Image (cartoon, grey):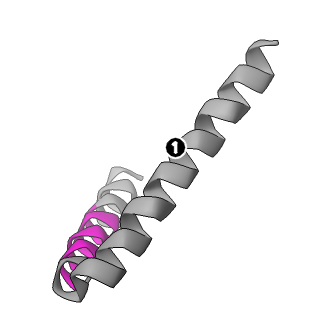
Amino acid sequence: MEDSRVTFLALGLLVVALVVILGSVILSPAITVLLATVGAWLNLTYLVGITLKR
């Protein structure tokens, strides 16, 4: 039962994230570009951090 609850929570969060992304694409493309840029920098920082900890 707990596994299905976690699955539904993850699916709900995915739907919310998709709605936010699609809404920002439609309403304000500049915000979408800003979010993508910040996300890319966070991903790069995360990968560099993991690499340096090895």
Q: Which residues are magenta?
A: 33-45
- In percent of the image, x 67 and y 26: which residue is there? 6
Query: Which residue ends up furthest to the front in the rendered image?
Result: 27
* Front position in the image: 31 or 44: 31
Q: Is residue 6 above or below residue 33?
A: above
> Which percent across, then down, holds residue 28?
21, 82
* Front position in the image: 45 or 6: 6
Q: Is residue 47 above or below residue 10?
A: below
Badge count: 1
Q: Is residue 50 above or below residue 12?
A: below
**Magenta-drawn stretch contains 37:** yes
Query: Which residue ends up furthest to the top in the rendered image?
Result: 1
Q: Which residue is mark 1?
A: 13
Element under disc 1: helix
- In percent of the image, x 58 and y 41: which residue is there? 12
- State left or right for residue 50 relative to residue 28: right
Q: Image quadrant of residue 22? A: bottom left
**Magenta-drawn stretch contains 34:** yes
- State left or right for residue 16 relative to residue 44: right
> Which percent across, then down, holds residue 43?
34, 66
Kindly report the secondary structure that dominates the magenta region of the rendered protein. Answer: helix
> Which percent across, then down, holds residue 51?
38, 62
- In percent of the image, x 37 and y 61: which residue is there? 20
